Amino acid sequence: MRIDAISIFPDYFNVLELSLLGKAKQSGLIEFQAHDLRSWTTDKHKTVDDSPYGGGAGMVMKPEPWGLAFDDVLTPKSTVIFTTPAGIPFTQKLAQELSTREHLVFACGRYEGIDQRVVENARSEVEVLEISIGDYVLNGGEVAALAMLEAITRLMPGFMGNAESIVEESHSDGLLEYPSYTKPQSWRGLEVPEVLLSGHHAEIEKWRRAQSVERTRQNRPDLID
Ligand code: ADE
């Protein structure tokens, strides 16, 4: 998979050199490039924003640098993701879907967002999604893009060592994952639940399922009909 990120703070993406994604890049599974939006400005001050038509607080990102950036970076097989708190919710299902794409381009907005014609123009050429990672507002889309990138790339075949842990984890079946325990069996007066020591696989499955349902009911009642 090829991934590009366009931002006025491309250094945000330096953290991708760390951990699993760094290894996936080295192995050639993922080809990643961060770009500085200002390199597509044409004025002396490298201006990327201006005041909003209609008035109001804050600044809006100008369309021209984005248009030139997309002219250079997009191909007919690209999917553009605009990171915005006004987008559709990012979910495990969407991560799964996007992990099958050939080329993802993250367009990271700052300020009050990007001139909406940039979205319209990109949509006339390639698949475009406006996505939010949650009901809160970040200073810009870079951290949102990093979160999505990590959720998407770990689902790619060959990325994770243990495919089973992906099948069992939270949200893969619509429920939160059951609690986990490891050694020692007794710690600060707290014991590992008896059933997990029993060796009865059917009983363990039943217990884990009940824990998943209870945890989901407590923490995320919205996930249960
Ligand atoms: N940019 C600012 N806030 C955001 C959010 N919640 N999700 C995606 N992009 C954002």
Image (cartoon, rainbow, N blue to C red):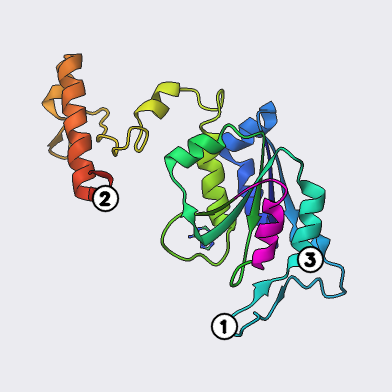
Q: Is residue 113 visible?
A: yes
Residue 33 numbered tag: none
Of pointers 1 and 3, the one earlier in the residue sequence: 1
Amino acid found under the numbered disc labelled 2: Asp
Q: Distance between the residues labelled 2 and 1?
A: 34 Å
Frontmost residue, 67 versus 146:
67
Magenta residue check for 24: no
Residue located at (67% from left, 52% from top): 123
Q: Name the residue under label 3.
A: 64
Q: What stretch is highlighted in magenta?
A: 115-128
Quarter location, residue 68? bottom right
The percent coordinates of residue 160 (x first, y second) are 51, 27
Q: What element carries label 2?
A: helix
Residue 197 picture location, percent across and down = 17, 20
Where does the image place residue 6, in percent across and percent down from the top left? Answer: 70, 54
Residue 57 badge: 1
Q: In screen coordinates, is 114 left or right of 163?
A: right
Q: Earlier in the sequence, mark 2 or mark 1?
A: 1
* Quadrant (top left, top right, bottom left, bottom right) of the N terminus: top right
Crowd band around label 2 with a 10 angstrom C-alpha radius: few (<14), some (14–19), many (20+): few
Q: Residue at x 34, y 28 (%)?
A: 168
Distance from Cα at disc 3 to Cα at disc 2: 41 Å
- The quadrant of the picture occupied by the C terminus is top left
Dot 3: few (<14), some (14–19), or many (≥20) neighbours within 10 Å? Answer: some
Residue to which mark 2 is pinned: 222
On whether residue 122 falls in the magenta region, the answer is yes
